[in-house]
Amino acid sequence: MNATTYGLDVAKQIFQMYWVDTQTGEIANRRFRGDELIAFLAQRPGGRVALEACGSAHWWARKIKAIGHEGVLLHAKFIRPFVQTNKTDAADARAIWTAVQQPGMRTVATKTEDQQAMLGLHRMRSLLIKFRTMQVNQIRGLLYEFGVSFRAGRVAGLNEIRAHMAELEGSLPGIMIDSLQDQLKRIDGIEQDINLLETQINGWHRQEAACQAIAEVPGIGKLTATALVATIGDATTFKSGREFASFLGLVPRQSGTGGKVWLGGISKRGDPYLRILLIHGARSMMCHTKVSGEWQKAIQERRRANVVAAAMANKMARTA
């Protein structure tokens, strides 16, 4: 007897589920609250519950697995084409149920709690870096309005500002100096928060053998290794390294008709944060590697720097 397949549309309070009874062929499309949904699934025989990979989806997939069902996550863009009418909870649940049964449908690996927590640390660090950059740029812009400019670079510029603080006190209004000192203290606080997050990330890197193995790939450091392991989830989800590189948007964008195919720039699909880390690692190799490999030399001779960085990032992802 085939296991029942359920299409589950999750939300914060109300959940919609669509399924077809394998014995009677009866179609059901019911609404549940969170506790009602868990109680209902706990009484049903083991089946396959498909849901969109959205907010809280990984938690629900783990919860569904714990009560004896298989949780299957689908990307939202693969579900949308199967919404036949207006977008409603009932229509979404039916679309999820239809999409998961398509041959060759790609799924999203369910992340563990540790992997989700690690991605959370990366997101917090990324936001703090953005705040720090905005703060430094604002200080530069405000000082420039008073005819004061400093060296380029965050570290060099801030050190120069602090070194010339006595001169600035004599040339700037007092209210401006007080605000400037407050801004510098805020930047120092953000720096401490970033360092604390990086310490936690490095601690997880030391505990995970997969992170240590990936960090051996040239161009991949601790940050990229931990982000890769946390994002991939289950590596067996991807058939090959080439498919993983495509998942990250590091392959050429294709457009074709009439039997002809044109290749453009990289598709930029998938996780932009992970793609940024890999390309930054590739640029670091281009700038700091003393002895380049034959492949890298050959591609640098015939392509411009941005293309070389994308190609090297692609190779790093496939190797990882």
Image (spheres, rainbow, N blue to C red):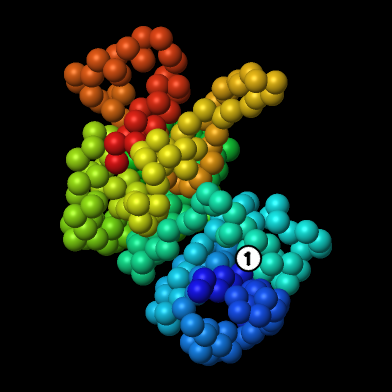
Which residue is under mark 1? 97
Above or below — where is 241 with respect to 89?
above
Q: Which secondary structure, mark 1? A: helix
| 302 sits left or right of 223 in the view | right
Q: Nearer the viewer, residue 4 or 37?
A: 4
Above or below — where is 122 with respect to 2?
above
Residue 175 is situated, as x and y percent measured from the top left of the image, at 53, 55
Q: Nearer the viewer, residue 53 or 182?
A: 53
Q: What is the count of numbered marks?
A: 1
Q: Which amino acid type is marked by label 1?
A: Trp
Looking at the image, which residue is at 43% across and 58% down? 109
Q: Nearer the viewer, residue 207 or 103?
A: 103
Evaluate whether residue 143 shows in this view.
Answer: no
| 119 sits left or right of 205 in the view | right
Above or below — where is 248 with respect to 147?
below
Q: Nearer the viewer, residue 273 or 65?
A: 65
Quarter of the figure that contains the C terminus:
top left
Looking at the image, which residue is at 60% across and 75% down? 22
Looking at the image, which residue is at 51% across and 89% down? 43
Q: Quadrant of residue 27?
A: bottom right
Residue placed furthest toward the top = 301
Evaluate whether residue 123 shows in this view.
Answer: yes
Looking at the image, which residue is at 59% across and 54% down? 102
Residue 78 is situated, as x and y percent measured from the top left of the image, at 61, 52
| 19 sits left or right of 83 in the view | left
Counting other residues with Cα less than 10 Å from the Cα at mark 1, is it few (<14), some (14-19), or many (20 or more)?
many
Residue 23 is situated, as x and y percent measured from the top left of the image, at 61, 79
Residue 218 is situated, as x and y percent measured from the top left of the image, at 24, 33
